[in-house]
Image: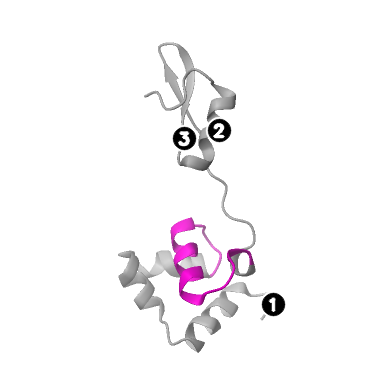
Amino acid sequence: MEGYPGRKIRALLIERGITVRQIVQKLGLQPATVSGVINRHRRSRRIEETIVEILGLPYEDLWGSPPRVRHTPLITPNGPSCQPKDDTNVQECAAKHPTDVGRN
């Protein structure tokens, strides 16, 4: 199963009596979206963290490194700026545009 991370995750879910349908209902998403993450066809930090929480395993054991936080550049009247996506990205934006962080 090592070459097929999706199978490993599905086996762990089955072992704990958890179905993909339960995850879908908890998150309010489509089954294909959740299955796509489990099978590693797409990334979703929200879905990945929910599965980590359900399985009680370290994030890196299931998914490897977390998805990167995207940097969203904005154009303001004063030139380029950026809007941090979350608290972890605030310092990165501040370093790139010290006077414009968080400005819309």
Question: Amino acid under label 2?
Answer: Gln
- The image quarter containing residue 28 is bottom left
In the image, 36 versus 69, the foreground residue is 69
Residue 35, placed above or below residue 80: below
Answer few, some or many: residues within 10 Å of disc 1's Cα (few below 14, many 20 plus, some between 14 and 19).
few
Question: Amino acid under label 1?
Answer: Glu
Extent of the magenta region: 39-60
Provide the secondary structure element on which disc 2 rests.
helix
Q: Quadrant of the C terminus?
A: top left
- Residue ID at (69%, 74%): 3
In the image, 27 versus 88, the foreground residue is 88
Q: Nearer the N terminus, badge 2 or badge 3? A: 3
Q: Which residue is mark 2?
A: 91
Q: Which residue is mark 1?
A: 2
Name the side, left or right, on which 68 lies relative to 101: right
Residue 57, placed above or below residue 103: below
Provide the secondary structure element on which disc 1 rests.
loop
Q: Which residue is mark 3?
A: 84
Q: Determine contact: label 1, label 3, CB under 8 Å.
A: no
> Of circles 2 and 1, which is in front?
2
- Residue ID at (69%, 77%): 2
Q: Nearer the N terminus, badge 1 or badge 3? A: 1
Q: Quick check: can you spot residue 44?
A: no
Compute the Cα span from label 2 to label 1: 37 Å
